[in-house]
């Protein structure tokens, strides 16, 4: 499990500021398309990782901030994303398609 988590973290570290991806896109990139939930578990555990993991840039497939409760305060994830230029309404990224970062397309 920790090897999978570390692979997830390496992908998440590549997401540029102002862009987001989904749990499922990361799972698919890692060759485990059915492991979106495990990517979510990795994001939940990322706060204890020795390196900074920009977990706020990983959302669900519809652009919803489903992991917002793991940031200490429910507004932290939203504020981090807004500070990077993303637009949100009711915990959903309104410009999701425009800001979506697909590791399958972006990573060589």
Image: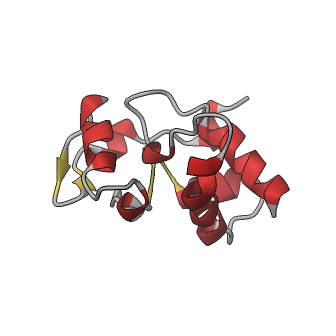
Vertical placement of 31 versus 79: above or below? below
92 displayed left or right of 37 = left
| Displayed quadrant of residue 13 | top right
Residue 6 x/y as whole percent: 76, 47
Residue for point 68% across, 69% down: 35
| Displayed quadrant of residue 3 | bottom right
| Residue with the most extreme left position | 89
8 displayed left or right of 16 = right
- Quadrant containing the C terminus in the rendered view: top right
95 displayed left or right of 42 = left
Residue for point 43% across, 61% down: 60
19 displayed left or right of 94 = right
Residue 82 x/y as whole percent: 24, 37
Front-most of residues 42 and 92 = 42
Residue 31 x/y as whole percent: 78, 57
Vertical placement of 68 versus 80: above or below? below
Front-most of residues 95 and 59 = 59
Front-most of residues 38 and 22 = 38
């Amino acid at each position: 499990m920790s090897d999978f988590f570390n692979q997830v973290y390496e992908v998440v570290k590549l997401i540029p500021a102002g862009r987001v991806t989904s749990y499922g896109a990361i799972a698919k990139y890692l060759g485990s398309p059915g492991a979106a939930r495990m990517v979510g578990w990795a994001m939940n555990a990322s706060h204890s990782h020795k390196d900074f993991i920009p977990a706020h840039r990983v959302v669900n497939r519809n652009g919803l901030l489903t992991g917002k409760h793991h940031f200490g305060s429910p507004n932290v994830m939203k504020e981090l994303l807004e500070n990077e230029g993303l637009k949100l309404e009711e915990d959903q990224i309104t410009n999701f398609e425009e800001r979506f970062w697909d590791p399958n397309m972006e990573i060589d």
